[in-house]
Each structure stands twice: as C-alpha cells, then as structure tokens.
C-alpha cells in the first residue's frame, strides 16, 4: 500500500508566529507512523503569500508583479 501523502499549509506567515512549530511537529508525528509521507509547503509556493506580505506593509497587491 502506498503511504498517505500529506502537505501542511501554515496559515500564519508572519515572523515569530507559532504556526511553523506546530506544522513541523505534525509532520514529525505523521512521518513517525511509517504509513504517511508529510511535508510543510514553503510560503513562497502559495499564491496568497505575496498578497499577505503586501497587505501587512500597507501596499495594494498587484499580481502583474508576478509576471515581470
């Protein structure tokens, strides 16, 4: 049987948040079972990460920056 594949998305991407610690703990628990493959998705791969960063800085998000 193929292992269950899990991808963890961290909801809070701000520096100093507790989310990454919980995500890494969960991945460790899942991997220790032996019947699951798990990993944390880096925020740079998530389409909304740039929009969140811009909003935190008070800037409107422009998706045309992605094409450049």
Image: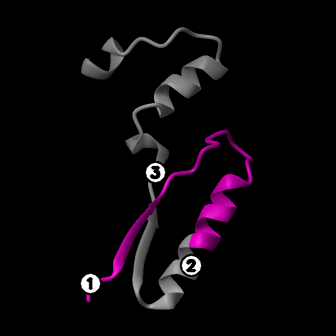
Q: Can residue 16 be found in the magenta stretch? A: yes
Q: Residues within 10 Å of mark 1 (few under 14, many from 20)?
A: few
Residue range corresponding to the magenta coloring: 1-26
> Which residue does the numbered mark 1 point to in the structure image?
2
Which label's residue is closer to the chain start, 3 or 2? 2
Could you tell me if the residues under marks 3 and 1 are in contact, i.e. CB atoms within 8 Å?
Answer: no
Disc sitting over residue 42 in the figure: 3
In front of the other: 53 or 30: 30
Task: Look at the picture and state if 41 lies above or below 48.
Answer: below
**Residue shown at the point (58%, 10%) measured from the top left:** 59
* 2 sits left or right of 39 in the view: left
Dividing the picture into quadrants, the one containing residue 44 is top left
Q: Quadrant of residue 36?
A: bottom left
Real-space Cα separation, disc 2 to disc 1, in angstroms: 19 Å
Image marks 3 and 2: residues in contact by CB distance under 8 Å: no
Residue 22 magenta-drawn?
yes
28 vs 57: above or below: below
Q: Depth-wise, is mark 3 or mark 2 nearer the camera?
A: 2
Describe residue 25's horizontal placement relative to residue 2 as left or right: right
Residue at the image position 32 percent from the left and 22 percent from the top: 66
Per the model, the C-alpha gap separating discs 3 and 2 is 16 Å
Give the image location of residue 54, x and y in percent: 56, 19
* Contact check, label 2 and label 1, Cβ < 8 Å: no
Mark 3 to mark 1 CA distance (whole Å): 24 Å
Q: Which residue is mark 2?
A: 28
Name of the residue lying farthest toward the front: 1
Above/below status of 54 relative to 10? above
Q: Position of residue 68 (x, y in %)?
A: 26, 17
């Amino acid at each position: 049987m193929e292992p269950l594949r899990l991808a963890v998305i961290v909801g809070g991407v701000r520096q100093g948040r507790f989310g990454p610690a919980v995500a890494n703990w969960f991945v460790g628990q899942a991997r220790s079972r032996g019947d699951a493959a798990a990993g944390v998705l880096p925020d740079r791969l998530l389409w909304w990460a740039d929009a969140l960063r811009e909003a935190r800085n008070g800037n409107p998000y422009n998706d045309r920056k992605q094409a450049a």
